[in-house]
Amino acid sequence: MSKSFFETHQVQMAIVPVDLSAAANNGDWVSLADYESCVALLVKGAGTAGDDPVFTMKQATDASGTSAKAVNFTRIYSKVGTQTSLGTFTTTTQAAAGTYTDTVSAEAQAIIGVEIRADQLDVNNGFAYVQLSIPDVGANAQVGGAVYILSGPRKPQATPATAIA
């Protein structure tokens, strides 16, 4: 019998639903020490033209953000528009960078995500934590929240260990 999603993945809150225009939105730091990868997934409501979210990923040596620096990624997955039907993700490729500026979703509902693999981190220098940040999107209200989905537990067990320290 195959295991359920919840037996092979850990889901952690990154950014609780909030008005993304109220301030910078820094997610919790999550550890990849016990996982192979982390998907950071933003879900947002429609906003105002020009108030596009900027997706930033950082890495650090501990859960308080010590020595934080960019963790580069090249692929961004998104669904932009009404989120009431199953659609396919659009893949955007960029030069390796720790930030992605979305330029099409301000006025629409959207799901935007990136995957960070543990082998992308500077593990030789003790980096094991990642964080998603969405800076203030602008002057107009735009509701959004984000989760981390961790996969590939290194220590299989009935319920994977928490990734928040």
Image (cartoon, rainbow, N blue to C red):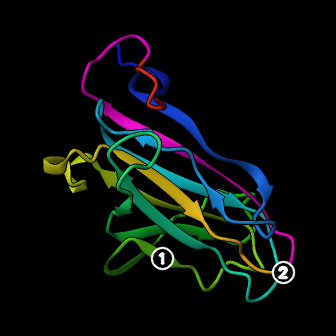
Q: Of marks 1 and 2, which one's residue comes earlier in the chain?
A: 1
Q: Residues within 10 Å of mark 1 (few under 14, many from 20)?
A: many
Q: Quadrant of the N terminus?
A: top left
128 to 93, vertically: above or below: above
Dot 1 amino acid type: Tyr
Q: Identify residue for label 1.
A: 100
Q: Residues within 10 Å of mark 2 (few under 14, many from 20)?
A: few
Q: Position of residue 53 (x, y in %)?
A: 64, 74
Q: Identify residue for label 2.
A: 139
Q: Position of residue 126 (x, y in %)?
A: 22, 44
Q: Residue at x 70, y 72 (%)?
A: 136
Marks 1 & 2, CB-CB < 8 Å contact? no
Give the Cα separation between the discs numbered 1 and 2: 20 Å
- State yes or no: residue 144 in magenta: yes
Dot 2 amino acid type: Ala
* Nearest to the observer: residue 51 or residue 79: 51
* Nearest to the observer: residue 2 or residue 21: 21
